[in-house]
Amino acid sequence: MMKTSKLTYIALLSSAAIIFGYIESLFPAVTTIPGIKLGISNIVILFALLRADKVSAFFVMLIKVCVSSLLFSGLNVLIYSLCGGIFSLLAMIAFKKLKFSVIGISMLGSIFHNIGQLFAASLMLGTLSVFSYLPVLLISGLALGFVTGTVCRIIVSRTDIV
């Protein structure tokens, strides 16, 4: 069973991630290429992984993806976001164990999020041609992952919350 304090912490972080996701949905698309967005709500998931544990980060990701998709997007987006979130979180857990920096973990998490979304798209559409977007998504993942990682590093360095 999960302690009330941990459950409350997960709920607060999930709420923050949903709010950031909503704020991000108000911005127009960065490009015409699907899948490229700022990813500011992922700062909260990375924060949960760094300050709490992988189970907390998983629940924050799961709640954020499910609630945000149902409120702001739809079921199709839920599938892409969930697949991207799982790929991303697994990568971030692995690279955290390998002692990568916060920014490195964020950049790799962003890249794997894009790979997860392409994987979902290839399954749903029945074609591997969606992977032709991979080079662009890798570059955007590195750039935007750097930004979110930098913000997360600043937040982590200025908080004592556990």
Image: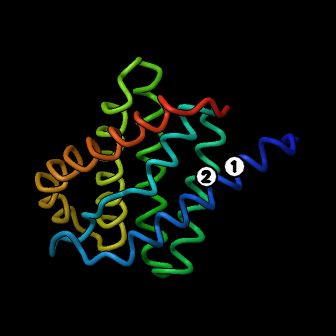
Residue at left 36%, top 22%? 100
Relative image position of residue 76 (x, y in whole percent): 44, 77
Residue at left 27%, top 66%? 35
Relative image position of residue 7 (x, y in whole percent): 78, 48
Does 147 sit above or below residue 33?
Answer: above
Quadrant of res 154? top left
Residue type marked 2: Val
Distance of label 1 from label 2 (alpha carbons): 6 Å
Relative image position of residue 153 (x, y in whole percent): 40, 33
Residue at left 49%, top 33%? 156
Does 130 sit above or below residue 2?
Answer: below
- Of the image marks 1 and 2, the number of the one nearer the N terminus: 1
Residue at left 29%, top 70%? 126
Residue type marked 1: Ile
Does 79 sit above or below residue 26?
Answer: above
Answer yes or no: do the residues labelled 1 and 2 have beta carbons within 8 Å?
yes
Q: Quadrant of the N terminus?
A: top right
Residue 10 disc label = 1
3 sits to left or right of 153 = right
Q: Identify the secondary structure beneath mark 2.
A: helix
Q: Which residue is mark 2?
A: 60
What crowding class fits label 1: few (fewer than 14 Cα within 10 Å), some (14-19), or many (20 or more)?
Answer: many
Relative image position of residue 93 (x, y in whole percent): 48, 32
